[in-house]
Image (cartoon, rainbow, N blue to C red):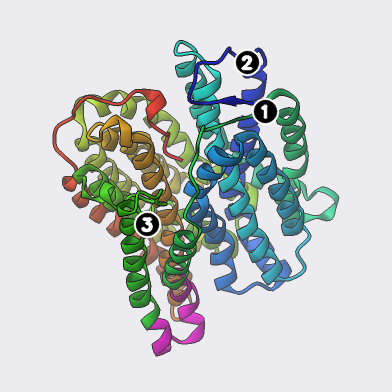
Amino acid sequence: MHESTGAVSLHPQRWPALVMILIAVFMDLLDATVVLIALPSLQHDLGASETVLEWTAAGYTLAFATLLITGGRLGDRYGRKRVLLTGLVVFILASVAAGASVSPAMLVVSRLVQGAAAALMIPQVLPFIQTEFSDEERPKAIGVFGMTFAVGGVSGPLLGGLLLNADLFGWGWRTIFFINVPFGLVCLAGVAALARESQTEAARKFDVLGLLIATVALAALFYPLIEGQALGWPVWILALPVAAILVFAVFLWRERAAVGRGADPLINPALFRSRAVSGGLAVAVFFFCGPAYGFVMTIFLQDFARWTPLRTALTLLVFAVGVVFGSGAATQLAPKLGRRVVIVGPLVMAVGIGMVAGAVRLGGTEVGQWQLIPGLFVAGLGMAAVATTLITVVLAHVHWTDAGAASGVINTTIQIGTALGIAVIGTVFFSLLDSGPPADAAIIALVCVAALLLVSAALGFLLPPQQRDPVTQEQAQPTT
């Protein structure tokens, strides 16, 4: 074992080890995206309700977001290789359980466990790069890490469509979870054989009670959003979001008290005093509700337009292609234009989503893929403008000693925003399905997505207007 705080010799197997570790990153991205294409199929097979679909899609991201910072702390304290291998084992077992699910409840629980396991795996990657690579090699290693996000984002929906179309062994949608087993076993063996252990010297205890309080606050927020319609919106459901705010206030009070005692808080409340961080959090919450359009369109296209999963996947893949095309330009423009990139991005994505809504308006349930492709590509360009630059823009105004903490908080908020978008937009969509034509429900849901993006653009003005000294690549954690 070696310490991350001191000078160490370079590990001769660092590049093969990185490749094995990045398989875990690929699996996480795959599971976060591939399930959307399979939602209609698993709904019909398991007799799942609409709320189960929302929990299946959002539960993974919510569990991941809740434990993301804690996963990093566990790696610092108990060893990053050990925590990564533990997460891998749990992830593989949860994937098997998800694929073998015989009830909606079993599937939802399996997805929550998958997300929690991913939160143990992913935070170990950047510390591995930081400790195992020289200053000269590190940018290249981070570039390979970033490339994995692009490959995972593009291949997830496509692989889901191919697997559902192939229907291997008659397993249908279950193969999207079983595919994790061979990937996971290769990753497990490779990491165990090639990576070496590291941990932070004198890492302090993490705040277990603070984590539980934050989890209760998130549960009180998400439960009514997803279950409220099915339960008929009783008073106690309406009261839960208010309770969530109060519980979150208790969480911040506890974290502030921990700082006062000299203890190690889960999140340092002092970060929120930074205009860059608070503005970045506000943008992230609203902007990353945007990908909920995919939840709506997948169900609309397969259940009502009668598209095959493969056709749906190939069409929605255009959005990921737009992200890839826009990422390079956005990365180059961010240091020069600063917050203006973060303001323009949501506007461009809102235009793209509006184009998709217009295509559905014109074609209804007979809409063609060529009607949807232009809007999806434009929306992808808008997503790239924010997804690849937000953390860089924020960290340009944060002292380098706070860069890691600020990056972790922003990334956690991004995951929460993604889950929140599915919960809110999904509830709107399903509510309208009960009272009108499917095309109208999809259009209104897409308009709601565009409205959230416009709010995000307005909140971009909360960010500081001028760039300061940018942090280095190794100080910034890529937006996940």
**Quadrant in which residue 242 is drawn:** bottom left
Q: Which residue is mark 3?
A: 357
Magenta: main secondary structure equals: helix
Which numbered marker is on residue 20?
1
Residue 52, placed above or below residue 340: below
From the viewer's perspective, is 219 left or right of 124?
left
Q: Residues within 10 Å of mark 2 (few under 14, many from 20)?
A: some
Local secondary structure at mark 2:
loop
Q: Assess whether residue 61 is covered by the magenta stretch.
A: no
Name the amino acid, label 3: Ala
* C-alpha separation, residue under disc 2 versus residue under disc 3: 52 Å
Residue furthest to the left in view is 465
**Quadrant in which residue 239 is drawn:** bottom left
- The magenta segment is 222-238
Q: Where does residue 5 sit, x and y in percent of width and height?
A: 48, 25
How many tags in the picture? 3
Q: Are marks 1 and 2 in contact (CB under 8 Å)?
A: no
**Quadrant in which residue 28 is drawn:** top right
Q: Residues within 10 Å of mark 3 (few under 14, many from 20)?
A: many
* C-alpha separation, residue under disc 1 versus residue under disc 3: 41 Å
Residue furthest to the front in view is 261
Whichever of labels 1 and 3 marks the residue nearer the N terminus, that label is: 1
Name the amino acid, label 2: His
Which numbered marker is on residue 11?
2
| Residue beneath the point at 44% across and 58% down | 363
Q: Assess whether residue 231 is covered by the magenta stretch.
A: yes
Front one among 242 and 290:
242
Whichever of labels 2 and 3 marks the residue nearer the N terminus, that label is: 2
* C-alpha separation, residue under disc 1 versus residue under disc 2: 15 Å
